[in-house]
Image (spheres, rainbow, N blue to C red):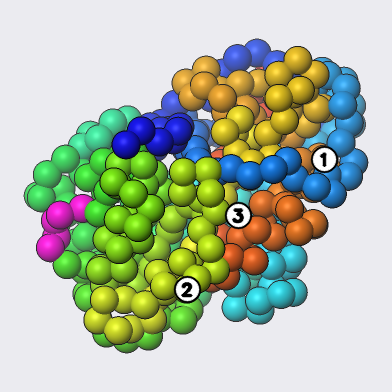
Amino acid sequence: MTLPWKRRGRAKVTLLLLAVAVLPPSCLESNPQPFPATDTSRGGGGGPDAAGNKGLDWGAPENQTDGAVDFRAEMRSLVQTIAAYARAENPDFVVIPQNGLELLTLDGEPDGPLADEYIETISGCGQEDLNFGYPGLGDVSPAEMTERLTAFLDRLEGADRDALVIDYCKNDEQTDASLAVAADHGFIAFPADRRELDDIPGYPPEPPDVNEDDVTELSQASNFLYLINPGEFESRQAFLLAMAQTDYDLFVVDAFFDDEPLSPEEVEGLKTKANGGRRLVLSYMSIGEAEDYRFYWQESWNDDPPAWLAAENPDWEGNYKVRYWDPGWQAILLGSSDSYLDRILAAGFDGVYLDIIDAFQWFEEQSGQGEHGEQD
């Protein structure tokens, strides 16, 4: 069965993408980045164009370059806006940004002053390739990178927030090592065996620290499954059944299967572990890139892009960086019954797993900002 999934996988790419109009100098807090930023979104989704998309500027992207932009503060603000909006309907809504750990501190350094308001807003953070997977499946991540990211995650745990770690492992030995490191630090680990995140790993044969407990908040989770490309399953029902037959404490899934959203009944069914315990079910949501295979995409944008739409990612066809601080893009994400977040809320998900948080790094590169916001 062929499904129209855009298989992004979770491959890492450098930030030197297509050239776009250079943004103006901004007064942001910036810092050196010793490793390429991650760029990790995927496909799926379907439905009619989003309604209530107020504030769209239909001029060319080059027209929206005026004014100083603090890219990091704007990303923090967007995450906080998403959390506040969702929690007005569900006070227990889980919000987990993936990657972009520099946002945890005001100076972007692991030992810097914490961004307290941001940390108080989020439920935890996800981080890919902590030990294995950079730059490819089974590659041992550079020691300096691992040390830096681990320092951020330890600060996060010290602030009473949870760290979810995804390693991309090529064998059982790497999986065991990933789980051991996570246990030492108190992280929640998912050792993936495929970058596409399209399967339920066969090893270990059951989730780490499997339990029959009811998991109703992130701090209670001992393990999780990250599966956002279900196109390899024979059918929608086969996917739902396979997921329901596991005992993971938490799922991160896409809100759509084969262009159709998961129904509230389907989401509710995923919330029960095979052993009878309750689990959390989160929806994947990319907020730093637009994807031309999502429900909100309009064909007219190919010739007449809105002002918030930036360069296409040359490594992932159909994925575009967005000026995520723009009201037009944010209206697609939330604020009407047809918006992305509102659809997720209506389906009954327990929370969101936010991707392309590190888009701020790309805009810093494009604006020519060097260390600590200085111009190169």
Q: Is residue 192 above or below residue 218?
A: above
Q: Nearer the viewer, residue 129 or 263?
A: 263
Q: Label 3 amino acid?
A: Thr
Q: Which residues are magenta?
A: 201-205
Q: Nearer the viewer, residue 9 or 81?
A: 9
Q: Is residue 348 above or below residue 340?
A: below
Q: Residue 19 lies in magenta, yes or no?
A: no
Secondary structure category for the residue under label 1: helix
User: Disc 1 or disc 2, which is closer to the eye?
Assistant: 2
Q: Nearer the viewer, residue 154 or 296?
A: 296
Residue 99 visible within the image: yes
**What secondary structure predominates along the stretch shown in magenta?**
loop
Which residue is depicted at the point 27% across and 61% down? 242
Secondary structure category for the residue under label 2: helix
Name the residue carrying label 1. Answer: 328
**Left-right relation of 159 to 75:** left
Which residue is depicted at the point 39% across and 63% down? 251
Residue 306, given in percent of the width and then of the height, sits at 80, 27
Residue 129 visible within the image: no
- Location of the C terminus (image quadrant): top right
Name the residue carrying label 3. Answer: 105
Q: CA distance from mark 1 to mark 3?
A: 28 Å
Residue 80, given in percent of the width and then of the height, sits at 70, 60
Q: Label 1 amino acid?
A: Gly
Q: Is residue 116 above or below residue 191?
A: below
Name the residue carrying label 2. Answer: 268
Q: Who comes first in sequence, dot 1 or dot 2? A: 2
Secondary structure category for the residue under label 3: loop
